[in-house]
Amino acid sequence: MKSIYEKKWAVILIAIFCSILWGSAFPVLKISYEELQMAADDTIAKMVLAGMRFLLAGLMILVGLIITNPKRLLVTRRQIPVLILLGIFQTTVQYYFFYNGLANVTGMQGAILSSAGTFFVVILAHFFYKNDRMDWKKGIGLIAGFAGIIVANWGQGLELSFQLNGEGFMILSAVAAAIATIMAKELAVGIHPFTLTGWQLSIGAAVMLLIGLPQLSENAMRFTPLGWGLFFYSALLSAVAFALWYSILKYNKAGEIAIYKFITPLSGALLSAMLIPGEAINVYIVGAIALVAVGIIALNYGGRGRKNGK
């Protein structure tokens, strides 16, 4: 009997749900920065907040496993170094470059460059897995999805420039995320996805805090009741989204699943328009959603093809 994570309709719904959850992080973080009175250029404070968020997310999953199935917490000695490496790539490296790079690029550049991770996953999957080669469906999905990101940000200002600590860091963040996706798929063969998620988030977050806390300025963050609420929600969404994403990644092709991440920046824009004063839905957002929908339909056109594997 097939797992729920292998049924096509469930995979599509879970992938969309995870992408929307990640998208909700954009307005939540924007509101959090203002509520916590964080300076716009204080990347160390943002790194520490991210470390706190992901550490809590990881602990949520690990505590849940202790309550429901303690045996799943156990990993072999051979898996420990890989878990550490995955935590560093998926959480520490990716978000270090992301937060620092995002501070030095425009909103449009950030959205476009952050979506580059999808391209890198599809390319890596093409070389790592025999049954996950590039085909016309993925090609249309990539083109339509990327076009959607550009359309959504049209008019916000796109400068064709390059600086290492801006565009360079955003690209490095995307590369780290793509490498982590392939690593997670490989490691998920011998470890439960929830265990994988809990440990990698906790390890990666701990490294971020070790780097950031010694450099954190006094009163860099001022927590309020709303600030705590937003913080706990952001941790919860990370725990749920990563756990479910790794679960479908275990049973499905990385190159196909990655296409759904084009939904993340678009859902972020939609939710920002709903939650943040001054931001509104416009014709560009509607057009972008239509383009991403075309990409997803193309990706799922016809049969699933061969089973997942190398």
Image (tube, rainbow, N blue to C red):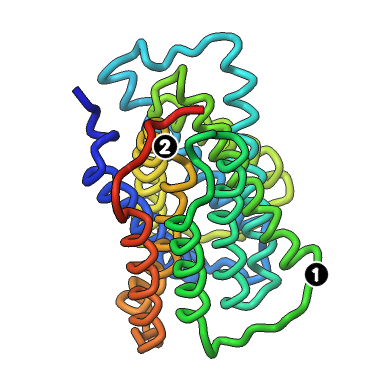
Question: Which residue is found at the position 40% from the left and 74% from the top?
Answer: 269
Q: Is residue 186 left or right of residue 291?
A: right
User: Depth check: 294 or 180 in front?
Assistant: 294
Secondary structure beneath dot 2 equals helix
- Count numbered badges in the picture: 2
Q: Is residue 249 left or right of residue 8?
A: right
Confirm whether residue 156 shows in the render. yes
Circle 1 residue: 163
Quadrant of the rendering where the N terminus is positioned? top left
Residue 126 picture location, percent across and down:
57, 43
Q: Give the foreground label among 1 and 2.
A: 2
Residue 166 picture location, percent across and down:
73, 67
Secondary structure beneath dot 1 equals loop
Question: Which residue is found at the position 66% from the left and 51% from the top?
Answer: 96
Residue 83 picture location, percent across and down:
57, 25
**Splitting the image into 4 quarters, where does residue 182 fall?**
top right
Confirm whether residue 209 shows in the render. no
Question: Which residue is found at the position 71% from the left and 42% from the top?
Answer: 211
Circle 2 residue: 249
Three-letter amino acid code of the residue under disc 1: Gln
User: Depth check: 310 or 290 in front?
Assistant: 310
Residue 117: which numbered mark, if any?
A: none
Three-letter amino acid code of the residue under disc 2: Leu
Picture layout, residue 111 above or below residue 173: below
